[in-house]
Amino acid sequence: MKNLYLAMAFLLGGVALAQQGFQEQIDELKQKSDKFNVFLNFQSSFDVINTQDVGTETYFKARQLRLEFRGNINERIFYRLRHRLNKSNAGADLDNLARATDLMYAGFRLNEKWTLTAGKMCPSVGWF
């Protein structure tokens, strides 16, 4: 009987020491997930073409398959890489980097308003 009480006291004491506050667990999880994130983006379609000569043609088409890595190494240093898996890996003329690589850069946050970034980036196109 003494052994049973001793085992229960040991187990209950270990559980009581192992518990963290709920907010502490969330903060720890946020810190871990911010360093390395992987995204797999997939876009496909089901196309139907109706012509008088041939009739109706239907087919599935995989339009994009992208693999993306991004994260924050610390509060100031960050990185991002986005690569298309269904595009040719042939090198570009200027830098011989694969045309399938959309983004590949690293950056340093100087302060809240200024960031220094180096690497391959997409041009910003759009209106407001």
Image (cartoon, rainbow, N blue to C red):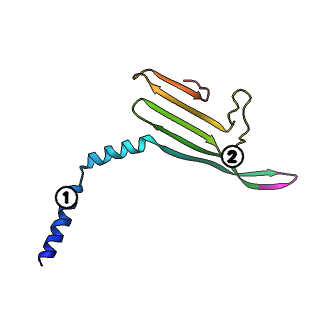
Nearer to me, 90 or 45? 90
Nearer to me, 4 or 120? 4
Is 56 included in the stretch rendered in magenta?
Answer: yes
Say whether residue 127 is left or right of residue 35: right
Secondary structure state at the residue bearing disc 1: helix
Q: Is residue 107 above or below residue 53?
A: above
Q: Which tag is nearer the camera, tag 1 or tag 2?
A: 1
Q: Is residue 81 above or below residue 122?
A: below
Q: Residue at x 41, y 44 (%)?
A: 33
Say whether residue 115 is left or right of residue 6: right
Which portion, as a residue range, is magenta?
A: 51-57
- List x then y, in percent, for residue 18: 24, 56
Q: Is residue 57 above or below residue 5?
A: above
**First along the sequence among labels 1 and 2:** 1
The residue wearing badge 1 is: 16
Secondary structure state at the residue bearing disc 2: loop
- List x then y, in percent, for residue 99: 69, 36
Is 75 included in the stretch rendered in magenta?
Answer: no
Q: Residue at x 16, y 75 (%)?
A: 4
The residue wearing badge 2 is: 86
The residue carrying pointer 1 sits among few (fewer than 14), some (14 to 19) or many (20 or more) residues within 10 Å by Cα, namely: few
